[in-house]
Image: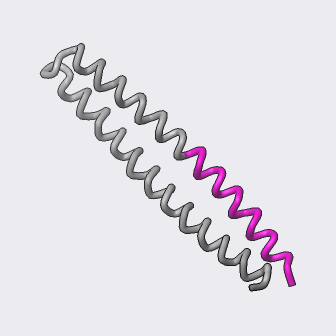
Amino acid sequence: MSVKTELAQALAALEEEYRFWVVESIALERGIDNLEEKIALHEQEIGPERAAELRARLNRTRERHTAIEERIRYVRHQLHNLKMRLNAMP
């Protein structure tokens, strides 16, 4: 297998991973927004202690979202590098 073919396969695999992480990030962000709204709407019903607990859990989810966003940036950078290498090959 040629180096160019190997790079093309690596690029395809990385693009697939990139799409996965983008979808994960979007779904997680929507979920966070939805939960924030629900906590705000039902804070009176669930009480301040339960609302604080839910917000603490939501903060951990935000941290996960941040980690996914960092992974997306890394994969995007790798995609760019692979595309540049592939385009530079004869």
Examine the image and state in which quarter residue 2 appears: bottom right
Image quarter (top left, top right, bottom left or bottom right) of the N terminus: bottom right
Going by the picture, which residue comes out furthest to the front? 1
**Residue at x 73% of width, y 63% of height:** 80
- Report x, y in % for residue 85: 81, 70
Horizontal relation, residue 63 to residue 73: left or right: left
- Report x, y in % for residue 37: 28, 34
Going by the picture, which residue comes out furthest to the top? 49
Horizontal relation, residue 57 to residue 43: left or right: right
Going by the picture, which residue comes out furthest to the left? 45
Horizontal relation, residue 30 to residue 84: left or right: left
Along the line of sight, the residue nearer the viewer: 11 or 58: 11
Examine the image and state in which quarter residue 10 appears: bottom right
Q: Is residue 3 above or below residue 22?
A: below
Q: How is the image coloured?
A: one colour
**Residue at x 42% of width, y 30% of height:** 60
- Report x, y in % for residue 46: 16, 21
* Most common SS among magenta residues: helix
Image quarter (top left, top right, bottom left or bottom right) of the C terminus: bottom right
Horizontal relation, residue 14 to residue 6: left or right: left
Magenta region includes residue 80? yes
- Range drawn in magenta: 69-90
**Residue at x 33% of width, y 44% of height:** 31
- Report x, y in % for residue 69: 55, 46
**Residue at x 66% of width, y 71% of height:** 11
Q: Is residue 80 above or below residue 46?
A: below
